Image: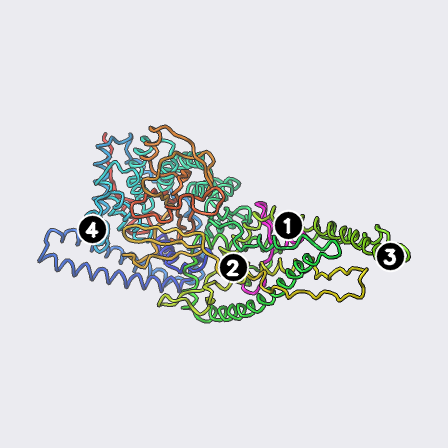
Amino acid sequence: MRIIIFLLVSFLVAQTVLSQEPTQQPTKKELTIEIQKQIADLKKEIAEVEKQIGIAQKDDPESVKDLEQQLRMLKEQLATIEETYKGISGMSEKTFQEAATAEEENNSIPKRDITRISILPKKILSDAELASFVRTVNTEVEKMIPATEKAGALKIYNETKAKYNSTDVTGNAASGCWMYGHWEKALCIMGRACMDDMTNTDNLNNYAAFLSMTGAEQAALPILQWLNNKYPKNSTILNNIGQAWFGLGDMTNSKKYLDSATNLYNTHSMANATLSKIYESEGDSAKAISSLKKAIRENYDPEKEHELNRLGIQLTFDDLPELDYPMKTDPLGLIPLIELFPEDFPSAIGDDGKVDAVNKFVDGAQDLNEKLDRENEVLSQKVRGRNEKLSSDSLYRGEFLEPYNSPAWKLAQRSIELFYAEKSEGMASLATQFLFHFPIPFVGRRIIIDPQEILHDCDSIWENEVVIPLARLPYERPGAGENPTCDQVNAWVNAYQAKVAAIQNKGMKKIKKIYVDNSGKLDKWMKINIYALQDAPKDIDGKTSDLITSLDKTILRRRLENSAFQEFLDYGLRIVKEQEYLVNNCGRNEVRKKRGLPVKDVLTPLVKYELPCEFIKTLKTPLVGFTAKCNTIEKDPNSKIEERKPPVQKGQGQISKKGNQNRGPLNNMRRGPFAFYDYTETEIINQRSAPLNAEDKDPSQFSIEYDKWGNLVGLNVQLNEDGTALADPDSQESGIDSRWSWNAAGNTSNEFLPFKGKLNKTIFYQAKQ
C-alpha cells in the first residue's frame, strides 16, 4: 500500500496547476493511466542507458560501471511500479479509495527511524571532517542519479563553472534546477559547488535542504549542525534542522528546533506548517490550528487552507496575509475627480461665473457618464465573448489561466472570495465576477473600504448637513415682507442665497474630507480588485488577442476604472444640481442672460487610458527564470530546461541581490515596509556569512515558496515605506549571482520513492567507536 501512495503522490504532483484548489485524490482509472505512462517512460530510459552502455564499452570502458549501476536502479524501479500496477488493477474502485485515503491520513508523521538516527555523528564535525563528509555524500548521491540526469547536471556544472568561475553562480544554477523541479540535477550540481568552496554557507545550507527534502535527512543533519554551531540563532538553519529531525521521525528534536525558528520569526511558513502536523499528532488541535494560521499569514496556500478545513476551521479574510505588492496611491485617479466637485455655489445676484462653473461640472459629468456607458457596453460584449470561449475552448482556457498561477493573483482572488462570503453571507463570488457592473463591497478587520461605504457616509453628511438645513431654511428666515421694493427683494434673495451657498459649501467640504481621509483604505480595496483581475491571454505568436482594447487595457481593469468613475459621477450628479442665473428684480424687463456653451470634456481627461503595472520582479539563474508582473508569472522563454513537477517538495527560498546584504535582522518582523538596526562591522560581516533568514529585510530581499504539488504559492517582496514601489528600485531584477537560502519543507514520504528510498537507507557517516 505504501507503493500505491508513492504513485498517488507522483500522479498528484503531475496534475495541472491551472486551478488554485488543492489537488484532489485521483480515481483508480486516472492512476492506472498515469502508471502506464510512467512504465512507458521508464522503458524508454532503460533503452537509452542500454544504448549508452553499448557505446561506452567501445569508447569509454571506465564509465560502463556507473551506467550499469544506473541501469540496475531503473530496472528495480520499473519492477516495483509494474508490481504495483498489477496490485491496483485487481482492486475495486471502492477498496482503492479507502486504502489510499487511510494510508494518506496515517502518513502525516514519519515513524522514528532508529537506524538512521543511530548512525548520526555524536559531535559537531570539524571543518576537515565536514569537507570529507560532503565529498562522501556527493559521491554516493551521484551514484544513485539516473545516467541521463547526471550527464545533464555535469554539463550544466561544467559550463557554468567555466563561464562564471563562481560558486555563487554555480549554486544558483542548482537552485534554478530545483525551482524547475529537476531535483536530481540540483543535488548533483549543489554537491559539487559545495566541494568547490566549503566556506560558501548558502550552498551548504541549500545542499542540506535539498538532501532533507529528497529523503536523506541523515546526510543533511551533520551539515546543518555544523552551520548551527557556527551561526546560532539563524531561523533558516534552525528550520532545516527541525525539518530533518521530522523526516527522521524524532518529533522531540524536531519541535525543539522548529520552535526556535518560530521564536525568531513568528510566522515562519515552513516551520509552522510542520509544527501544525506535530501538534495534531499529539492531539493538540488548538496549537495545530494556531501554527497553521501563522503559516498562512506568511504565505497563503490553498493546500494549507485545505488542511485548516480538515481541522474543522474555515479560513476568514482576517486570516489571510496582507497583499504586500506595490501599487501607487489613488491608482484610478479618483481624487482629482472628487476635487472637481464644486464647492462655490452662486451666493448673490450676479454670480453668473459660479453658475457657469457648476453647470459645466454637471454637463461634463453627464457627458462622461454617457461615454462610459457606451464603452462599457462594448466591454461587456467582449467579456461575454471571452466567457463563451473560456467555457468551450480548453486550449484557450489553458493559455488564459496559466500565467495566473501566481501568488499575487491567488491571494487577491481568495481575498475577494472571502470578502464576498463574509459580506454577502455566502453569495457566489469569482464565478460571477465578470457579470457584476461593480464588485460587491467587503468589510474586514484590516479596514478596507469600498466605494459604496464611502458614498454611504457621504450621503449621511449631505442629508444631515445640507438637505435638512436647506429644507428648514424657508421656515427659519422670514420673507421680504408685504409690498417690498425691488431693492428689498434683491437684498432678501442675496441673504437667502448666501445662506444656501454657505450650507452647500460646508457640506461639500466635509464630503471631500471623508473621501480623502478614507482614500488609503479605498486603495487597499482597489489593490485587491486590480490584482485579482485577469488579463486577456496571448496567442502563440505573442501578439495580444483581440480581447485587448485598442488602448492596450485589459477588459476588466478598464471596466473597473469606468465603474469607479461612474459611482462617483452618479453621486456628484445626485448632489450637484444644475443652477439658474439669479435675476436682478429691479430690471424685470431686461433681456435675461443666456447660458454659455458648456465645456463637455471638462472631466473626460481625468479617466486614465492606461493603468501601468507597479510591480515587476525578474528572477534569473544561469538556467531558468521568471518575471512576476502585476498578477501574472511569465516564465523565461530562454530557459535551458523545461519545468516539471517533482515528487519532492521544493520548500521556500530566500533570495537577495548579491552584495546588498549589509544589515542585520529586523525588530519588526513583517513583510512589506521595513526598518533597520545599526550593527557593528563585525556583526555585519557575520550576518553576511550566514544563510539568509526569512526575517532578514534588506531592501533587495524577497522570498518564494512552493506547495507540495510544485506550484508557486508565495512571493514576498520588500516595499518602500508607503507601499508604492520596491524598497530597492535596482532590485527589480535579481541576477544570476543573487544569494539564495532554502528553507526545507517537512518530508513525510521518504521510503515511497525508489531514489529517495535509496538515499533513505544510505549510510553516509560511520561514527567512530
In this picture, which residue range is highlighted in magenta?
434-458
Residue at label 3? 485
Q: What element carries label 3?
A: loop
Q: Are marks 1 and 2 in contact (CB under 8 Å)?
A: no
Residue behind mark 1: 512
Estimate the spatial distance between the alpha carbons at disc 4 and disc 2, rounded to whole Å: 49 Å
Image side of residue 512 versus residue 138, left or right: right
Is the residue marked by circle 1 packed among few (<14), some (14-19), or many (20+) residues within 10 Å?
some
Within-10-Å neighbours for mark 2: few <14, some 14–19, many 20+: some
- The colour scheme used here is rainbow
Residue 435 magenta-highlighted: yes
Please tell me how many numbered marks the rendered image carries: 4
Q: Do the residues labelled 3 and 1 touch (CB within 8 Å)?
A: no
- Label annotation for residue 608: 2
Crowd tier of the residue under label 4, counting other residues whose Cα lies within 10 Å: few below 14, some 14–19, many 20 or above: some
The residue wearing badge 4 is 159
Q: Which of marks 4 and 2 is nearer the N terminus?
A: 4
Cα–Cα gap, marks 3 and 1: 40 Å
Q: Which amino acid does label 2 sit on?
A: Lys
Secondary structure of residue under mark 2: loop
